[in-house]
Image: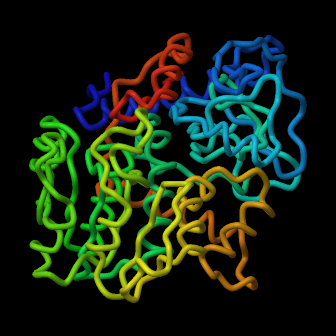
Amino acid sequence: MGAAPGPEGAGSLRKDSKVAVAKAQAVGAGRRQVTMKGLYFQQSSTNEEITFVFQERENLPATEDYYVKLQVKACALSQINTKLLAEMKMEKDFFPVGREVAGIVLDVGSKVSFFQPDDEVVGILPLDSEDPGLCEVVRVHEHYLVHKPEKVTWPEAAGTIRDGVRAYTALHYLSHLSPGKSVLIMDGASALGTIAIQLAHHRGARVISTACSLEDKQYLERLRPSLARVIDLSNGKAHVAESCLEETGGLGVDIVLDAGVRLYSKDDEPAVKLQPLPHKHDIITLLGVGGHWVTTEENLQVQHHFCTKRMSVTKKNACLLSWILQIAIAFSSREQRWLSLTMKFGICQTYNRENIFLRILKDVMEKLSAGVFRPQLDEPIPLYEAKVSMEVVQKNQGRKKQVVQF
């Protein structure tokens, strides 16, 4: 009789068995001619209320040309920008929900060159995708996908890809982050803030961050490498500009990545925006000479006479920066996507546009696999809980990234 396999051999057999089971399930899902449930949202006639509904979908048709049929293993939940959809004239009766997906390739089109069946991949569905990511099987163009590293789990891959692209875009392309620069990352305990802090530390920057609650402050103080300073905004006593100038010896910070700003005085600010946010003039005050301000405030306007320092924020550039964190991952088609990126990044038009995006996706996954990125993820939930969870996400009430695991 042969000897029993050792611990390493047994572990390898268990791993091979799990892989075989996953592949068998993937192939079976691809061949079944059944209906599937997908999550969609419907907007009221007044455009003020969103309703999330499950709808039955027929099994997908044969895969064509450059498209990949994907069995979704995990899909991250993100807030839907309905205003952006309206401005891009992409409103529908029922709009698919879920765009950050990770899964197993079931089938590939005749012209697909990057993938083959059984590959494990991760990517972001385009804004004009007809398939919701919150569904068992979806179709996606191969240029929106990259291979998932083996040691990265499904929830980690889906839960990191979007914020990784946003942080990479803001700090690498827009701000030209380099070792020794000082960076202020607002709301560092958020899902995006956490990834941005980790990327900035990886590039050798000195990072300052703000906390909106005691729990956020304690979380940020536990991060390693340590932050240069954590500014607690929860008690209303700390002043962001003063704290940053004190930390930098009066020189100001080189890069600011905000999480929204106040456009008016507290008396004039709408009630819904009364949260611990700095005023736009405070951001200008704390910026150093030649500083970069990357903002998520879509209505930001900065008058020229306030910009007394050499920096990248003029009234025109502020508008461009305010769009980038949403547009960079909210593209509708490849041409529209890269037209917007080349306008904002100043990228040479001769570059292969798809390769630039794929390079970012690959780098995000490599950093996740190497432990540079350690995302803030909530416990994965099943598909039937996605409707309730999306309602919470849409109201911006969650802190950790929520991921649906199939």
Residue at 62% x, 44% y: name it: 119
Q: Residue at x 26, y 38 (%)?
A: 8
Name the residue rendered at 13%, 65% in the picture. Answer: 243
User: Quick check: 106 left or right of 368?
Assistant: right
Q: Residue 67 or 284: which is nearer the viewer?
A: 284
What residue is drawn where x is 41% and y is 51%? 260
Q: Which quarter of the picture shows residue 360?
A: bottom right
Q: Quadrant of the C terminus?
A: top right
Q: Horizontal and vertical percent for residue 20?
A: 54, 28
Relative to 212, 357 lies left or right: right
Q: How did the renderer colour the structure?
A: rainbow
Residue 302 point in image, percent of width and height: 49, 69
Left or right: where does residue 308 sit relative to residue 315? left
Look at the image and tell me in which quarter the N terminus lies.
top left
The x and y percentages for residue 368 are: 38, 53
In this view, 404 is above or below 193: above
Depth check, front residue: 291 or 99: 291
4 left or right, relative to 216: right
Whether 95 is drawn above or below 296: the answer is: above
**In the figure, 389 relative to 19: above or below?**
above
Along the viewing direction, whichever of 338 and 161 lies nearer the viewer = 338
User: Relative to residue 365, is residue 352 depicted above or below?
Assistant: below
Rendered location of residue 287, percent (x, y): 30, 76
